[in-house]
Amino acid sequence: MTTWHAADDLVLRYAEGTAPETDAWSLEKHVESCTGCAERVSAAVRGRGTAAAVLDGVRAAVLAGAAAEPVRGADGRRVPGAGPRSWRRLPGAGRWRAGGAGARRAAPRAHPVGRVLWAAGPALRGPWAGALLLVVCAAVALAYGGGLGEAARPLLLVVAPVLPLAGVGVSYGRSADPMHEIIAASPAGGLRLLLVRTASVLATSVPVLALAWAVLPASAGGPGPLTWLLPGLALTLAALGLGSYVGCRAGAWTVASAWLAAVTVPGLGTSPSALAEAARTATRFFTGPSAQGAWAAGAVLCAGLLALRRRSFDHLETS
Amino acid sequence: MNSTVKVSGLTVRHRRRTALDSVDLDFGPGVHGLLGPNGAGKTSLIRVLSTAAAPDAGRIELLGTEVGAASDHRGRAAVRRRLGYLPQEFGHYAGFTVREFVAYVAWLKEMDGARTAAAVERAVERVGLADRIDSRMKTLSGGMVRRVGIAQAIVNEPELLLLDEPTAGLDPEQRVEFRALMRDLGEHATVILSTHLVEDVVTACEGVTLIEAGRVAYRGTTRELAALGKDGTQDELGGSPIERGYTTALRSHRATAGAR
């Protein structure tokens, strides 16, 4: 036996459902063995219409769910804020309450890494990441198993700037992102989210491509490492700039097609191997300070255009 | 009345077609129904009010802030934090659980990270899906996905809630529960829901706005619309008073619009 009894104000707050959870627990433990306090609690609960309704709801939950989980002060405390007619307190809501107690117990916090992935958006979750790996694995396999040898690096140059573009194309906008309409009405949407997603696409593709480059056999007189970096960045920014007019997916596909046309068309008909010619063209586009300087200037121009057009990402794409 | 939503001269065009033609409207706290035939402009109106789409002309003031023009971006971001929106069609990322989906929207709404976990659980609980909170979205039925859509719209306890066909795919019992939730929310927030179900409006809404061919055809309380149905000729219309009121209002609007 104990000499402690529930104070009047605790009984009242418990009946109202406003007692802190720990206090409610000790009160409940106490009334199991103390008839006097149990009667006072019952009287207080009967005297309060709203709390009585809460307890009815709790009882219904216990009966319906037959849950082993003790339904205690926590429920009484949480319910008053829900207003008089919330969905879960209607008849038949019992099973939801039982489930709710279990779910609350689990209640994992969103992990910081998870948040970064959220920000990255659909591209890293979708088929694009698989396509990226497939391309670099194919390049390595062709170089060593397919007898491509030294020609593999220039060939990788042809596709390297296009891969991030494809990632951007499946990252943002009405046709690529199933949540786009919700995103278009949210404060985090718009150019900032688009840039975060683009950055995550680049942060994934650049290391993967650089690694593949390092693994591939060196070619004498070939382009240096990371020569594709500036062109890739410039083309990605061009896709975003164009995307501000026509939508991100259309922008990305247009720029990617233009790039592939630029490297393949000059070689058509001049050489027996169109692929080798395309690789030579791409190498020519990338090598030398003047070529790299031109790509840098292009990147700056596209970034400027994007800055001017930033408000066009505030709403749903119209096309 | 203190208006939380004020719209004037609102015009929305889809290519050549005019979806909304110089519409003037205002709404205050409470639950308001948008009724109208298919293609009347309900979705266009909800989209513009949710700030998802930009108007072609006109002014929009939400929660005391102008949001219509491109230069209103600061105010628009602030309003978007206090706004909930359920689009007519919405998707989700493969593999997301209910909890992750609603939490992702909370993140998009720039909610305080410390409050998010509890707010997500409360929102999911309010739509009666607490026992499925860790289920993957793709395992849910159509009605459940709709309810998750409602949960994401209310996760930030919005002051302005815009719902486009929220009861589509819900069974009758769930619809009853949904309307109770709406009345609950409407005590503090401005709730605007577009629907083609007249009974949604009767049981959940205080005010009715009837949209027809991009114009406002009728505005009044639910009771007034029902009274219109009682006054009107009983003839061949049949149906409930509110359905007759709907038809009467629509016909008289068409008659005057045709005379112009």
Image (cartoon, rainbow, N blue to C red):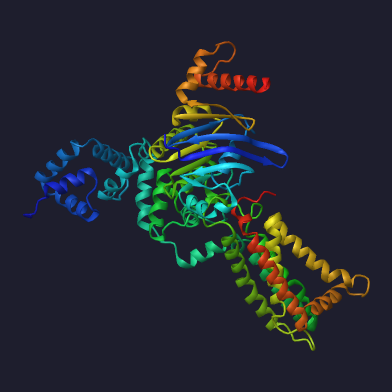
Residue ID at (29%, 42%) = A58
Query: Image quadrant of residue A211?
Result: bottom right
Q: In this view, does B172 lie above or below B116?
A: above
Residue A14 drawn at (x, y percent): 20, 46
Residue B101 horizontal side relative to residue A225, left or right: left
Residue A137 in sight from this viewpoint = no
| Quadrant in which the N terminus of chain A appears | bottom left
Residue ID at (41%, 47%) = B157
Residue A239 in sight from this viewpoint = yes
Residue B112 horizontal side relative to residue B232, left or right: left
Front in this rendered view, residue B250 or A309 = A309
Q: Is residue B120 above or below residue B227?
A: below
Number of numbered discs visible in the structure rendering: 0
Query: Going by the picture, which residue comes out furthest to the bottom?
Result: A220
Q: In this view, does A268 lie above or below A40?
A: below
Residue A194 drawn at (x, y percent): 60, 61
Residue A150 drawn at (x, y percent): 79, 84
Q: Is residue A42 above or below residue A201?
A: above
Front in this rendered view, residue A203 or B63 = B63
Front in this rendered view, residue A46 or A61 = A46
Residue A202 drawn at (x, y percent): 63, 70
